[in-house]
């Protein structure tokens, strides 16, 4: 896709982090922006900032895990703009992390509801329209956690492996059908966003009791704060996404830190050897 002006981008999780940065970059080339997010205050503020770029911004309060909310989002988009030209299935949460035997069903459910069902509902409501228009781009936000398997965040990993698989499977399905709809799989490493504070959007019914909560050390919080100074920034990721859309590139990786880990995993699969042992997703930065 090379012509953007007057076309429409729909971005879930568009009120913060990479979603907002993608919205900004699409707005800068004159696209209408539909921001779908569960966090009302941030959503309103994000829409105001996008409108200041002299394009139409439509905020739609949406819980991507909720079937009815996603149906409503679809109705709004269809009535105002028709099929999306760019659909970013991006909303996501860090999910419950920690030692696996101490995780609760609520930890697993929260991650799966947002990170996986968000994509499932997004495709359910928009893919048909996009296939009918035979054009457009679907950007699935997965993670390096979908290409390797880090310890200490199994619910998150599982949803991101599913996201990669959905993007790859959809790519093949559309290619086989000769469809004009393109698919991209965004696999960021650590990016300085608000994801470390995902709990702000954790639904009440999926919150753990204090007794079930796994402690997070002060040391870890301080490390994350320092780490954010050194890692990719959301606007850099948005630039990569934009280039991938222009160039028709499927994989979008944000840094080279994980390439060895991904290659080692693939070798272990090819050679029937044990998965390579490794530290957490942030351990590559502490070496
Ligand atoms: N930041 C990272 O290091 C990193 C790395 C790899 C992948 N990712 C992925 O990037 C995507 C964007 O996250 P981010 O890092 O920009 O974090 P972020 O917290 O800054 O943004 C996530 C957005 O999703 C929204 N959201 C959360 N739950 C929602 C729900 N149920 N329905 C609708 N919106 C909801 C939040 O309100 C927020 O606006 C996520 O899918 C995340 O898993 C992030």
Image: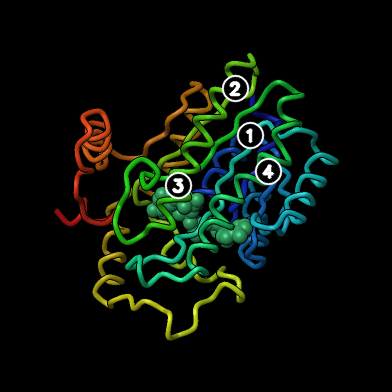
- Contact (Cβ within 8 Å) of mark 3 with mark 1: no
Does the residue tagged 1 have its C-beta within 8 Å of any atom of ligand 1? no
Write the residue at 82% across / 45% down: 75
Which mark is first along the chain, 3 or 2?
2
Q: What numbered label is drawn on residue 226?
A: none
Report, in whole angstroms, how far the alpha carbon at label 4 lies from the one at label 1: 10 Å
Write the residue at 50% across / 59% down: 93
Would you name the residue on which mark 4 appears?
A: 33
Is 192 positioned to the left or the right of 247 in the image?
Answer: left
Would you name the residue on which mark 1 appears?
A: 86
**For the residue labelled by badge 4, is the local secondary structure a helix, a strand or a loop?**
strand
Specify the farthest residue to the right: 79
Report, in whole angstroms, how far the alpha carbon at label 3 lies from the one at label 1: 21 Å
Is 271 positioned to the left or the right of 163 in the image?
Answer: left
Against 9, residue 97 (above or below) is below
Write the residue at 32% across / 48% down: 149
Would you name the residue on which mark 3 appears?
A: 160
Which mark is first along the chain, 4 or 2?
2
Of the pair 271 and 27, the residue shown nearer to us: 271
């Amino acid at each position: 896709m090379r012509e953007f002006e007057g076309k429409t981008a729909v971005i879930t999780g568009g009120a913060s982090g990479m979603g907002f940065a993608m919205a900004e970059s699409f707005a800068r080339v004159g696209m209408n922006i539909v921001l779908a997010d569960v966090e009302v205050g941030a959503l309103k503020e994000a829409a105001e900032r996008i409108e200041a770029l002299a394009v139409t911004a439509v905020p739609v309060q949406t819980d991507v895990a909720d079937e009815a909310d996603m149906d409503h989002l679809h109705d709004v988009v269809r009535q105002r703009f028709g099929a999306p030209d760019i659909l970013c299935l991006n909303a996501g949460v860090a999910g419950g992390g920690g030692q696996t035997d101490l995780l609760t069903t609520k930890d697993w459910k929260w991650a799966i509801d947002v990170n996986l069902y968000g994509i499932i509902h997004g495709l359910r409501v928009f893919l048909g329209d996009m296939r009918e228009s035979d054009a457009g781009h679907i950007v699935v936000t997965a993670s390096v956690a979908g290409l390797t398997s880090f310890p200490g965040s199994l619910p998150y990993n599982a949803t991101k492996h599913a996201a990669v698989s959905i993007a790859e499977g959809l790519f093949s399905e559309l290619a086989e059908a000769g469809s004009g709809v393109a698919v991209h799989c965004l696999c960021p490493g650590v990016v300085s966003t608000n994801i470390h504070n995902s709990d702000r959007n954790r639904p009440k019914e999926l919150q753990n009791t204090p007794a079930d909560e796994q402690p997070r050390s002060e040391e870890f919080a301080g490390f994350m704060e320092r780490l954010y100074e050194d890692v990719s920034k959301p606007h850099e990721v948005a630039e990569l996404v934009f280039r991938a859309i222009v160039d028709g590139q499927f994989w979008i990786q944000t840094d080279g830190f994980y390439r060895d880990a991904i290659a080692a995993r693939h070798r272990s699969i090819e050679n029937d050897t044990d998965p390579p042992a490794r530290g957490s997703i942030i351990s590559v930065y502490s070496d």
